[in-house]
Protein backbone atom coordinates (compact mmCIF):
# COMPACT_ATOMS: atom_id res chain seq x y z
CA UNK A 1 0.00 0.00 0.00
CA UNK A 2 1.35 3.44 -0.84
CA UNK A 3 2.22 5.81 2.02
CA UNK A 4 -0.06 8.79 2.51
CA UNK A 5 -0.08 11.98 4.54
CA UNK A 6 -2.33 15.00 4.36
CA UNK A 7 -1.05 18.42 3.27
CA UNK A 8 -2.61 21.83 3.88
CA UNK A 9 -1.46 25.13 2.43
CA UNK A 10 -2.55 28.22 4.37
CA UNK A 11 -2.46 31.27 2.13
CA UNK A 12 -3.72 34.84 2.36
CA UNK A 13 -6.81 34.16 0.23
CA UNK A 14 -7.36 30.40 0.40
CA UNK A 15 -6.70 27.36 2.58
CA UNK A 16 -6.17 24.28 0.40
CA UNK A 17 -5.70 20.66 1.35
CA UNK A 18 -5.50 17.15 -0.04
CA UNK A 19 -4.11 13.74 0.81
CA UNK A 20 -0.77 13.13 -0.90
CA UNK A 21 0.66 9.90 -2.24
CA UNK A 22 4.19 10.06 -0.86
CA UNK A 23 5.69 7.66 -3.34
CA UNK A 24 4.72 9.76 -6.38
CA UNK A 25 4.21 13.25 -4.92
CA UNK A 26 0.76 13.36 -6.50
CA UNK A 27 -2.49 14.34 -4.82
CA UNK A 28 -4.38 11.17 -3.87
CA UNK A 29 -7.76 12.96 -4.16
CA UNK A 30 -9.06 16.28 -5.50
CA UNK A 31 -7.99 19.14 -3.30
CA UNK A 32 -10.50 21.18 -1.33
CA UNK A 33 -10.19 24.96 -1.06
CA UNK A 34 -11.91 27.15 1.52
CA UNK A 35 -11.55 30.94 1.54
CA UNK A 36 -9.25 32.19 4.29
CA UNK A 37 -11.40 33.84 6.98
CA UNK A 38 -10.97 37.61 7.35
CA UNK A 39 -9.50 38.72 9.67
CA UNK A 40 -7.28 35.66 9.52
CA UNK A 41 -6.82 35.27 13.27
CA UNK A 42 -5.40 32.01 14.73
CA UNK A 43 -8.81 31.00 16.05
CA UNK A 44 -10.69 31.55 12.79
CA UNK A 45 -7.99 29.87 10.69
CA UNK A 46 -7.84 26.86 13.06
CA UNK A 47 -11.61 26.38 12.65
CA UNK A 48 -11.27 26.49 8.86
CA UNK A 49 -8.39 23.97 8.91
CA UNK A 50 -10.53 21.64 11.06
CA UNK A 51 -13.47 22.05 8.66
CA UNK A 52 -11.24 21.24 5.70
CA UNK A 53 -9.90 18.07 7.34
CA UNK A 54 -13.44 16.98 8.27
CA UNK A 55 -14.42 17.06 4.60
CA UNK A 56 -12.05 14.11 4.02
CA UNK A 57 -12.45 10.70 5.57
CA UNK A 58 -9.01 10.61 7.20
CA UNK A 59 -7.76 7.82 9.46
CA UNK A 60 -7.07 9.23 12.92
CA UNK A 61 -3.38 8.35 12.64
CA UNK A 62 -2.82 10.17 9.31
CA UNK A 63 -0.20 12.87 9.95
CA UNK A 64 -1.10 16.35 8.75
CA UNK A 65 1.45 18.87 7.48
CA UNK A 66 0.48 22.55 7.32
CA UNK A 67 2.29 25.42 5.63
CA UNK A 68 2.27 28.89 7.12
CA UNK A 69 3.74 32.13 5.67
CA UNK A 70 5.99 32.99 8.62
CA UNK A 71 9.18 32.01 10.40
CA UNK A 72 8.34 28.78 12.24
CA UNK A 73 10.48 27.45 15.04
CA UNK A 74 9.47 24.41 17.09
CA UNK A 75 5.93 24.87 15.76
CA UNK A 76 5.68 28.51 16.90
CA UNK A 77 5.14 31.43 14.47
CA UNK A 78 7.75 34.12 15.10
CA UNK A 79 6.79 36.64 12.39
CA UNK A 80 3.68 37.76 10.49
CA UNK A 81 4.67 39.82 7.44
CA UNK A 82 1.50 39.21 5.42
CA UNK A 83 -0.90 37.71 7.98
CA UNK A 84 -2.73 38.92 11.08
CA UNK A 85 -0.18 40.11 13.65
CA UNK A 86 -1.88 38.05 16.38
CA UNK A 87 -0.07 34.99 14.96
CA UNK A 88 3.25 36.13 16.41
CA UNK A 89 4.07 33.82 19.32
CA UNK A 90 1.21 31.39 18.52
CA UNK A 91 2.10 27.70 18.90
CA UNK A 92 0.55 26.77 15.55
CA UNK A 93 1.41 23.05 15.95
CA UNK A 94 -0.35 22.85 19.31
CA UNK A 95 -3.37 24.95 18.26
CA UNK A 96 -4.06 22.90 15.12
CA UNK A 97 -3.34 19.55 16.81
CA UNK A 98 -5.86 20.37 19.53
CA UNK A 99 -8.48 21.75 17.10
CA UNK A 100 -8.24 18.94 14.50
CA UNK A 101 -7.49 15.88 16.64
CA UNK A 102 -4.63 14.94 14.28
CA UNK A 103 -0.91 15.17 14.79
CA UNK A 104 -0.20 18.44 13.00
CA UNK A 105 3.27 19.64 11.95
CA UNK A 106 3.67 23.18 10.71
CA UNK A 107 6.35 24.45 8.32
CA UNK A 108 7.15 27.74 6.58
CA UNK A 109 5.28 27.85 3.23
CA UNK A 110 8.36 28.40 1.05
CA UNK A 111 10.27 25.67 2.91
CA UNK A 112 7.37 23.29 2.18
CA UNK A 113 7.38 24.22 -1.52
CA UNK A 114 11.14 23.69 -1.54
CA UNK A 115 10.87 20.26 0.09
CA UNK A 116 8.40 19.22 -2.64
CA UNK A 117 10.61 20.58 -5.46
CA UNK A 118 13.69 18.81 -4.07
CA UNK A 119 11.90 15.49 -3.77
CA UNK A 120 9.67 15.46 -6.85
CA UNK A 121 10.36 18.54 -8.96
CA UNK A 122 13.01 20.86 -10.37
CA UNK A 123 15.53 20.24 -7.57
CA UNK A 124 15.50 16.46 -7.69
CA UNK A 125 19.00 15.00 -7.45
CA UNK A 126 20.68 18.44 -7.34
CA UNK A 127 23.54 18.80 -4.88
CA UNK A 128 25.28 22.00 -3.75
CA UNK A 129 23.27 25.06 -2.76
CA UNK A 130 19.78 25.10 -4.24
CA UNK A 131 17.44 28.02 -3.61
CA UNK A 132 13.72 27.92 -4.19
CA UNK A 133 12.24 31.42 -4.35
CA UNK A 134 8.45 31.71 -4.34
CA UNK A 135 6.85 34.77 -5.90
CA UNK A 136 3.37 35.48 -4.53
CA UNK A 137 1.78 37.95 -2.12
CA UNK A 138 5.17 37.98 -0.39
CA UNK A 139 8.44 36.43 -1.48
CA UNK A 140 9.54 33.24 0.25
CA UNK A 141 12.74 31.25 0.12
CA UNK A 142 13.88 27.72 0.83
CA UNK A 143 17.60 26.97 0.91
CA UNK A 144 19.09 23.48 0.58
CA UNK A 145 22.68 22.42 1.00
CA UNK A 146 23.27 19.00 -0.56
CA UNK A 147 19.57 18.28 -0.15
CA UNK A 148 19.34 19.37 3.49
CA UNK A 149 17.02 22.27 4.27
CA UNK A 150 18.37 25.35 6.08
CA UNK A 151 14.97 26.45 7.48
CA UNK A 152 13.49 29.95 7.58
CA UNK A 153 15.96 31.76 5.33
CA UNK A 154 13.47 34.61 4.61
CA UNK A 155 15.24 36.01 1.55
CA UNK A 156 12.16 37.96 0.51
CA UNK A 157 13.22 40.40 3.21
CA UNK A 158 16.67 41.15 1.78
CA UNK A 159 17.02 44.89 1.46
CA UNK A 160 16.69 46.36 -2.01
CA UNK A 161 16.57 50.14 -2.46
CA UNK A 162 16.39 50.50 1.33
CA UNK A 163 13.22 48.40 1.74
CA UNK A 164 12.16 44.75 1.90
CA UNK A 165 12.75 43.26 -1.54
CA UNK A 166 9.27 41.70 -1.54
CA UNK A 167 7.73 45.18 -1.47
CA UNK A 168 9.48 45.82 -4.79
CA UNK A 169 9.33 42.57 -6.75
CA UNK A 170 6.66 40.22 -5.37
CA UNK A 171 4.10 38.95 -7.85
CA UNK A 172 1.44 40.91 -5.95
CA UNK A 173 3.42 44.12 -6.60
CA UNK A 174 3.41 43.42 -10.35
CA UNK A 175 -0.38 43.12 -10.19
CA UNK A 176 -0.95 46.10 -7.89
CA UNK A 177 1.28 48.45 -9.88
CA UNK A 178 0.11 46.93 -13.17
CA UNK A 179 3.73 46.44 -14.32
CA UNK A 180 4.33 44.95 -17.75
CA UNK A 181 6.42 41.76 -17.84
CA UNK A 182 9.54 43.56 -19.01
CA UNK A 183 9.46 46.11 -16.19
CA UNK A 184 8.80 43.43 -13.60
CA UNK A 185 11.58 41.26 -15.04
CA UNK A 186 13.91 44.26 -14.60
CA UNK A 187 13.10 44.23 -10.88
CA UNK A 188 13.54 40.45 -10.71
CA UNK A 189 16.91 40.84 -12.43
CA UNK A 190 18.09 43.20 -9.66
CA UNK A 191 16.83 40.85 -6.95
CA UNK A 192 18.15 37.59 -8.37
CA UNK A 193 21.52 39.16 -9.26
CA UNK A 194 21.80 40.17 -5.60
CA UNK A 195 20.90 36.65 -4.37
CA UNK A 196 23.29 35.18 -6.92
CA UNK A 197 26.13 37.45 -5.77
CA UNK A 198 25.54 36.72 -2.06
CA UNK A 199 25.13 32.94 -2.21
CA UNK A 200 26.47 31.66 -5.57
CA UNK A 201 23.85 28.90 -5.62
CA UNK A 202 24.09 25.90 -7.93
CA UNK A 203 20.51 26.43 -9.07
CA UNK A 204 17.64 28.83 -8.41
CA UNK A 205 14.11 27.46 -8.74
CA UNK A 206 11.31 29.98 -9.14
CA UNK A 207 7.96 28.99 -7.63
CA UNK A 208 4.63 30.55 -6.75
CA UNK A 209 1.49 30.77 -8.90
CA UNK A 210 3.15 33.10 -11.43
CA UNK A 211 5.78 30.45 -12.23
CA UNK A 212 3.32 28.89 -14.66
CA UNK A 213 3.88 32.01 -16.79
CA UNK A 214 7.67 31.67 -16.54
CA UNK A 215 8.09 32.07 -20.33
CA UNK A 216 7.11 35.72 -19.93
CA UNK A 217 9.91 36.66 -17.52
CA UNK A 218 12.58 34.00 -16.95
CA UNK A 219 14.06 34.32 -20.49
CA UNK A 220 14.57 38.06 -19.79
CA UNK A 221 16.91 37.36 -16.85
CA UNK A 222 20.66 37.20 -17.23
CA UNK A 223 22.39 35.50 -14.27
CA UNK A 224 25.50 33.46 -13.61
CA UNK A 225 23.39 30.81 -11.92
CA UNK A 226 21.00 28.50 -13.68
CA UNK A 227 17.42 29.68 -13.01
CA UNK A 228 14.49 27.35 -13.73
CA UNK A 229 10.74 27.28 -13.08
CA UNK A 230 9.29 25.10 -10.32
CA UNK A 231 7.61 21.93 -11.51
CA UNK A 232 4.91 21.45 -8.90
CA UNK A 233 3.47 24.96 -9.13
CA UNK A 234 0.29 25.35 -7.09
CA UNK A 235 0.51 21.99 -5.39
CA UNK A 236 4.07 22.33 -4.04
CA UNK A 237 2.93 23.58 -0.61
CA UNK A 238 0.44 20.75 -0.05
CA UNK A 239 2.92 18.10 -1.22
CA UNK A 240 5.86 19.49 0.77
CA UNK A 241 3.76 19.81 3.94
CA UNK A 242 2.66 16.18 3.64
CA UNK A 243 6.23 14.97 3.03
CA UNK A 244 7.44 16.89 6.07
CA UNK A 245 4.59 15.61 8.29
CA UNK A 246 5.41 12.03 7.37
CA UNK A 247 9.12 12.56 8.13
CA UNK A 248 8.41 14.27 11.46
CA UNK A 249 5.92 11.58 12.47
CA UNK A 250 8.50 8.88 11.71
CA UNK A 251 11.18 10.75 13.70
CA UNK A 252 8.75 11.15 16.61
CA UNK A 253 7.82 7.47 16.57
CA UNK A 254 11.51 6.57 16.51
CA UNK A 255 12.23 8.87 19.46
CA UNK A 256 9.25 7.44 21.36
CA UNK A 257 10.40 3.87 20.63
CA UNK A 258 13.89 4.75 21.83
CA UNK A 259 12.67 6.31 25.06
CA UNK A 260 10.34 3.33 25.70
CA UNK A 261 13.28 0.95 25.13
CA UNK A 262 15.41 3.00 27.51
CA UNK A 263 12.70 2.96 30.19
CA UNK A 264 12.30 -0.80 29.76
CA UNK A 265 16.05 -1.34 30.09
CA UNK A 266 16.17 0.83 33.21
CA UNK A 267 13.25 -1.05 34.78
CA UNK A 268 14.85 -4.43 34.13
CA UNK A 269 18.21 -3.25 35.55
CA UNK A 270 16.41 -1.99 38.64
CA UNK A 271 14.62 -5.32 39.01
CA UNK A 272 17.92 -7.18 38.59
CA UNK A 273 19.55 -5.00 41.25
CA UNK A 274 16.63 -5.48 43.63
CA UNK A 275 16.74 -9.24 43.14
CA UNK A 276 20.49 -9.14 43.86
CA UNK A 277 19.98 -7.10 47.03
CA UNK A 278 17.30 -9.51 48.25
CA UNK A 279 19.65 -12.49 48.05
C1 LIG B 1 7.20 35.77 4.88
C2 LIG B 1 7.76 34.39 4.66
C3 LIG B 1 6.93 33.65 3.62
C4 LIG B 1 6.81 34.49 2.37
C5 LIG B 1 5.93 33.84 1.32
C6 LIG B 1 7.11 36.50 3.56
O1 LIG B 1 6.57 37.77 3.75
O2 LIG B 1 8.02 36.50 5.77
O3 LIG B 1 7.78 33.66 5.86
O4 LIG B 1 7.56 32.43 3.32
O5 LIG B 1 6.28 35.76 2.66
O6 LIG B 1 4.64 33.65 1.79
Image (cartoon, helix red, strand yellow):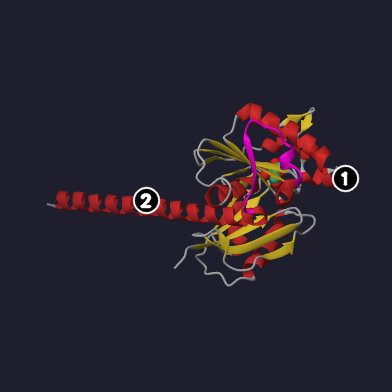
Residue 220: in magenta span: yes
Range covered by the magenta-colored residues = 216-232
Q: Residue at coordinates 50% horizontally, 65% vertically from top-left?
A: 61
Q: Can you tell which quarter of the image residue 130 is in? A: top right
The disc placed on residue 137 is none
User: Which residue occupies the foreground of this view, 152 or 166?
Assistant: 166
Q: Is residue 22 above or below residue 176?
A: below
Residue marked by disc 1: 178
Q: Quadrant of ligand 1?
A: top right
Camera sees residue 88: no
Q: Residue at coordinates 67% horizontally, 32% vertically from top-left?
A: 223
Q: Is residue 279 left or right of residue 157?
A: left
Question: At which x and y percent is residue 194?
Answer: 69, 29
Q: Can you tell which quarter of the image residue 203 is in? A: top right
Looking at the figure, which quarter contains the N terminus? bottom left
Residue 201: in magenta span: no
Residue marked by disc 2: 259
Q: Residue at coordinates 17% horizontally, 53% vertically from top-left?
A: 275
Q: Marks 1 and 2, how far apart in space?
A: 57 Å
Question: At which x and y percent is residue 243?
Answer: 53, 54
Amino acid sequence: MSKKAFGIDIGGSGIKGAPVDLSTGELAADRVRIATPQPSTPDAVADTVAELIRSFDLDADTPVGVTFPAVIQAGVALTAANVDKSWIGTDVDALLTERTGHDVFVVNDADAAGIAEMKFGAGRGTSGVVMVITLGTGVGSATFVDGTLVPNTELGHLLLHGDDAEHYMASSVREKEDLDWETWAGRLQEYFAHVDFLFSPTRIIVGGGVSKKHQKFLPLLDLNTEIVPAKLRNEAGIVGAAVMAHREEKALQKAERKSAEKAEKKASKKEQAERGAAK
